[in-house]
Amino acid sequence: MEIIAAYGTAMLILAVIFGLYMTWGIGANDLANAMGTSVGAGAISVKQAIIIAMIFEFLGAVLAGGHVTSTIRKGIIDPISIVNNPEILVYGMLASMLAAAIWLMIASAKGWPVSTTHSIIGALIGFAIVGIGPEAVKWGKVGSVVMSWIVSPLIGGTISFLLVMSTRKLIFNTDDPLKNAKKYAPAYIFLVGFVISLVTIFKGLSHLHLKLTTIESFLVAIAFGIFTATIGWSFIRKIKDDPSANKSFSYASVEKVFTPMMIFTACAMAFAHGSNDVANGIGPLAAVYSIISSGGEVGQSSPLPLWILLLGGGGIVLGLITLGYKVMMTVGKKITELTPSRGFCAELAAATTVVIASRTGLPVSTTHILVGAVLGVGLARGVGALDLRVVLNIIISWLVTLPAGALMAMLFFFTLKGIFG
Amino acid sequence: MPIMSNRHLSGLLRGSPFKPIQAHMRVVFSCVCLIPPLFDAVYRGESSLVSDFADQIKQLETEADKLKSTFRLNMPKSLFLPVDRKDLLSLIGDQDKIADTAEDIGKTFSFRDMTVPEGIKALLDELLEGTMEITASAKEMIEQLDELLEVGFAGRELDKVSRMIAGVRRSEHNIDEIMHRIKKKLFSIEKDLDPVSVMFWYQIIDLLGLISDQSENLADRLLLFLSK
């Protein structure tokens, strides 16, 4: 208790710095994957992607990020045995943030496909084992989190597979694909707005003191869906048949209908990313804050303050402005193989899966789910070639990231413990 | 700090294998397109023009070969494709054989100053026309691969391509019939011709027939994609 009283402010400042560092890294690197598809398809420019990311990452973190943050904060570790030494938990959370951030930095520099989520979970487990004891890790919860890493890409893939099939049935395999594309496009855009807002609103905004009943939630989501569909319709209705483009590729005009639709999935992806990855990054910061503000209480019953979510969003924006811009440009240039219709399906599937996972408090990886969604498109025979080595790399990165994050967290934990005494 | 993205998404998406196949087919087709002007030069006995065309065909064939090798090198086994990888590799191999055959025809004419026997000229023209027609439809068929990918190798586009495949097969049948007539004709006049030249004319007619056989093979390969 004395340590918290003496060094509380310093610890909080450190936590804010580490939290910013981590979210900065997420913004600089991770986001390019989430939105690269839309950039690659030419739906949005890099600049527009950055602006969309700024707004929707923020919204995602603030509106839908609370559940994941609380899982990181109190779902993984049971601090009951260190009630009298709350500083242990503070060291641990600081060490976890630093370990995850540094591991991400190393992996990014090497081009390894690691996930923020997996790094932070690995770090938390590592700290808990040496700092408190293996029994302090809620292994059941860890198990369900790890299961979600396997299940979520499968769900994303299934949804995207079904979406691609539906576009074939309703649009491509018909007499007048362009007419049908324009007819069904608003419905697809409605789906983007409706699903994302419904998952977010459905009893999920209590931390904003906004409590809606089930029916109210549905009504608001429908209204929001119609709102997005109307905006989309205003873009799409101007699209005309282009016979010269159709000559080399007869579905060129149809694909043009999907291009503006990818603006909406880009927003949805940024929102989903904010709700999961940003929330992950600031979970430990939230834990440190709650211990220090309560004067050393590890029970952590205090609600998540809004400024922490805002700080997370701010870190992402900072990362985007400083480095994310460049990464987005590089990745966007490479992701041109997905036609707009396929990119739309993949992004919609991924965003939906991530937001649902966030809503249930499961920390998942946006990028891995997106990879699953793209594989779903591939299974529907919808994309030229996918390199499955990437899937192998992801599996390897799973196996490496957990112990790497854990080891680094242990190291930093003892260092911090030594510094503060 | 050397920051790169977590590269997996851009690494996951490889270039479409159909684009290089189409590019290759276009080069092969331009090889075949040079055959009628080559024959025209032979008719007129302009040997410098003949060797010029033969050279051009050879250059295009080399280009097609390069495209084929690059394609093969970029097809690792780890790729997940909408069609069978082996079928794709065989398809480009079959396309390449058409260019090889065109080159063989060019070579024969550039080694030997050949005069066209008057009796087979008309039939030869008919055969050339048929050969051009069947390669052109084979190329059209390959150009449809993009569209097939868009609809997942099923549905309406499949019907269209199946019709194209059937068309190629009919043309091949037609060409067989022309070959039969031209060989019969050549046999009827062969005692009045130089025996060695006759041998070469049989060979050239067979090479032209080979081009349409090979075009038909492309149609069969494509059918494999569709029946998966």
Image: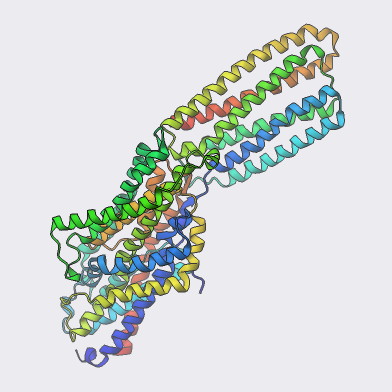
| Position in image of residue A420 (x %, y %) | 30, 89
| Position in image of residue A220 (x %, y %) | 21, 58
Q: Nearer the viewer, residue A363 or A324?
A: A324
Residue at figure coordinates x 34%, y 52% from the top left: A348
Residue at figure coordinates x 27%, y 53% from the top left: A226
Q: Is residue A295 left or right of residue A317?
A: left
| Position in image of residue A10 (x %, y %) | 30, 89
Is B43 situated above or below A271?
above
Question: Image quadrant of residue A298?
Answer: bottom left
Q: Is residue A274 left or right of residue B110?
A: left
Residue at figure coordinates x 81%, y 13% from the top left: B118
Assign the C terminus of chain A to one quadrant of the image: bottom left
Assign the N terminus of chain A to one quadrant of the image: bottom left
| Position in image of residue B37 (x %, y %) | 76, 28
Question: Image quadrant of residue A352?
Answer: bottom left
The chosen color scheme is rainbow
